[in-house]
Image (spheres, rainbow, N blue to C red):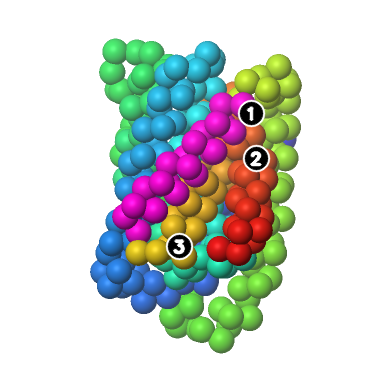
Amino acid sequence: MGQLIDVGLPVALAFIMFSLGLGLTIDDFFRVARQPRDVLVGLFSQVVLLPIVGFALASTWPLAPELALGVMLIAAVPGGVTSNVLTAFAGGDVALSISLTAVTSVVSVVTVPLIVALSHHRFMGGDSLGDFSVASTALQVFAIVTLPVMLGVLTHRLAEPAARRLRPKARTLSMVLFVLVLVGAVVGARDTIVPYFAQAGLVTLVLNVVMMVVAWTVARGLASGPKQRIAVTIECGLQNGTMAIAVGVLLFGGGLTVVPAATYSLTMFATALLYLGGLRCRGS
């Protein structure tokens, strides 16, 4: 089982990111330059504010060091693949959501290793980061996240009809793989997940709710309008739990470090759907 998880998690994540790339075009990245205001608001909320909120919670909440590191893992990774779909259901700016997902997935090759390295130093102890290779981590993130997205975009560019036919099946398979990854992570930590689930579940729920409120507040003041506010809020609420689990397994052998990612992945959909329901009730 351990070997299956070690191999299966990176492969599953790589395919999920490839399927995301199939739905993107090069123009999605150029959109960053054409509407910098909303993209910068989303990036600031996702890449800067979310890790700060995660760090504040992980530092003050009574958590085991591995769980605190796990909280930072879920706070460091980019937005989830399904955020684009839920943004569409909520009547938000889908183009902005796609751009944010794409850009944060690409910049994660730099941000994730740095945040994880500093968090490892802070919560796991040690006088230096000498035993934690930021460069090696960056290469692993690039291999399982950025490169598959780029291959997906290239496939869309060179074989658009085939990419359109493949995209629905790829998304369905991605959801199946996500469930399998989640189950695999829980099974891998089955000996310790029960006594720690309530503790990790509560802190990740608070992280999710607080960050959505913070993102909504920032976007309300700085974004272009309601549609952009919806996109930024959902993008900051739905994290790439599969990536957090994969990084936790690759770098730390799984265990308690993947428990926060598992609990966050379960709760983020519930809070996002509640947010969507609230928007529908208000007619926003």
| Image quarter of residue 127 | top left
Type of amino acid under label 3: Pro
Secondary structure at numbered mark 1: helix
Identify the mark nearer the N-term, 1 or 3: 1
**Gap in angstroms between the C-alphas marked 2 and 3:** 24 Å
Read off the residue under disc 3: 226
- On screen, residue 216 above or below 69: below
Read off the residue under disc 2: 267
Prevailing secondary structure class for the magenta stretch in the rendered image: helix
For the residue pair 80 and 118, the one nearer the viewer reads as: 80
Secondary structure at numbered mark 2: helix
- On screen, residue 24 above or below 252: below
Can residue 87 be seen? yes
Tell whether 256 sits left or right of 25: right
Q: Residue at x 63, y 20 (%)?
A: 199
Residue 167: percent from left, percent from top: 61, 73
Type of amino acid under label 2: Thr
| Callout 3 crowding tier (Cα within 10 Å): few <14, some 14–19, many ≥20 | some
Type of amino acid under label 1: Gly
Q: Nearer the viewer, mark 2 or mark 3?
A: 3
Residue 45: percent from left, percent from top: 37, 46
- The part of the chain drawn in magenta is 201-223
Examine the structure image and report whether residue 213 is included in the region drawn in magenta.
yes
Quadrant location of the C terminus in the rendered image: bottom right
Disc 1 vs disc 2: Cβ atoms closer than 8 Å? yes
